[in-house]
């Protein structure tokens, strides 16, 4: 799958799913803005991409802050002259049962996932509309479909991302901008390694393919949705779960 000389921003690409996505896009020909709150992690991923022979810049960004997001998109265009792909992947969890969840835990998660995805789509699509092309992939979660216990903030924000994907897809289709969402299941990353071992095992036991997903499983789905092969696909939600919750 070829995305040669496309310019991509991947948020939250300092580690985990975002890092693997940035590397997979680069391996298939893209230059990448490695955007993360953690600048050191982003710089290290940018070096890995350069070692693959592609261009990369590290960008420190809090996706929940408009000025950071506008600067990130500006930097992408000033450095590479273009912006073809946006992957909204940055994410956090602040789990608690609903009766115990603080307002702060709720707000933090909604800010990063829901507001962050909105701000990044808005800034990127302003540019993509002018050039009449673009691919946006939003990372939702299967928790938006099933409603995980202890995640009223996260499941709610991830469901909002699905609705926002469809609005953006409708508004952007006439500009040849495709907007799609992916719902990962249980993926082996720091986010799920932070779960209690018993809960991790229970989650893995419920996967028909009998293994946790790897970041690469998500990155490959992102690659497809960012390629020309997906030119007529927009407003969709792809589950990448090893068959969980079918
Ligand atoms: N791991 C899973 O099982 C799973 C399942 C479904 C969905 N997801 C989603 O996939 C995405 C990536 O998850 P992961 O497992 O790789 O997580 P991770 O914790 O390994 O990595 C998340 C990255 O996002 C960055 N980040 C956090 N807040 C940010 C902000 N405000 N601005 C910019 N960067 C920020 C972090 O610094 C980190 O590098 C998230 O949106 C997550 O909700 C993960």
Image: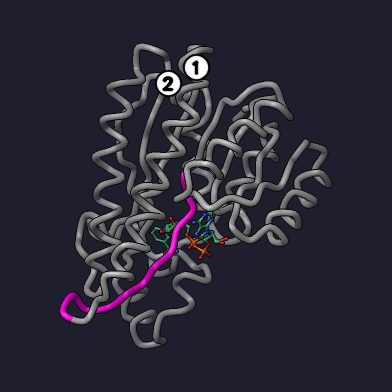
Q: Please report contact status of discs 1 and 2: CB closer than 8 Å, yes or no.
A: yes
- Which class describes the residues within 10 Å of circle 2: few (<14), some (14-19), or many (20+)? many
Q: Identify which residue is drawn at 64% across, 51% down.
A: 60
Circle nearer the N terminus (1, 2) = 1
| Quarter of the view holding residue 40 | bottom right
Residue 216 sits above or below residue 210 on the image: above
Does residue 138 appear anywhere in the picture? yes
Residue 134 percent across, percent down from the top left: 49, 23
Residue 6 percent across, percent down from the top left: 64, 26
Residue nearer the viewer, 112 or 16: 112
Give the secondary structure at mark 2: strand
> Which residue occupies the extreme front position in the image?
67
| Quarter of the view holding residue 155 | bottom left
Q: Identify which residue is drawn at 38% across, 19% down.
A: 232
Residue nearer the viewer, 140 or 101: 101
Q: Identify which residue is drawn at 47% across, 42% down.
A: 66
Residue span colored magenta: 88-99
Q: Dividing the image into 4 quarters, which one contains the N terminus? A: top right
Q: Identify which residue is drawn at 27% across, 75% down.
A: 102
Residue 132 sits above or below residue 224 on the image: above
Residue 94 sits above or below residue 45 on the image: below
Count of numbered tags: 2
Residue 145 percent across, percent down from the top left: 21, 55
- The residue singled out by tag 2 in the image is 177
> Which residue occupies the extreme left position in the image?
99
Magenta stretch secondary structure, dominant: loop
């Amino acid at each position: 799958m070829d995305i040669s000389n496309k310019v991509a921003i991947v948020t939250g690409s300092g580690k985990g799913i975002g890092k693997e996505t940035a590397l997979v896009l680069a391996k298939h020909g893209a230059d990448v803005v490695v955007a993360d709150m953690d600048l050191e992690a982003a710089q290290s991923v940018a070096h890995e991409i350069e070692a693959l022979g592609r261009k990369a810049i590290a960008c420190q960004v809090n996706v929940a802050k408009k000025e950071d997001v506008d600067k990130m998109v500006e930097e992408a265009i000033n450095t590479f002259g273009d912006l073809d792909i946006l992957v909204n992947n940055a994410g956090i969890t602040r789990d608690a049962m609903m009766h115990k969840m603080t307002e702060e835990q709720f707000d933090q998660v909604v800010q990063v996932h829901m507001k962050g995805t909105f701000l990044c789509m808005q800034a990127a699509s302003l540019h993509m509309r002018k050039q009449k092309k673009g691919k946006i992939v939003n990372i939702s979660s299967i928790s938006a479909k099933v409603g995980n216990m202890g995640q009223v903030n996260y499941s709610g924000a991830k469901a909002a991302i699905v609705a926002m994907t469809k609005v953006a897809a409708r508004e952007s289709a006439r500009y040849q901008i495709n907007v799609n969402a992916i719902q990962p299941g249980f993926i082996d990353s720091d986010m799920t390694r932070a779960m209690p071992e018993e809960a991790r095992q229970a989650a893995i036991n419920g996967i028909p393919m009998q293994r946790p997903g790897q970041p690469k499983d998500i990155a490959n789905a992102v690659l497809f949705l960012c390629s020309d092969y997906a030119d007529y696909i927009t407003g969709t939600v792809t589950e990448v779960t090893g068959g969980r919750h079918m």
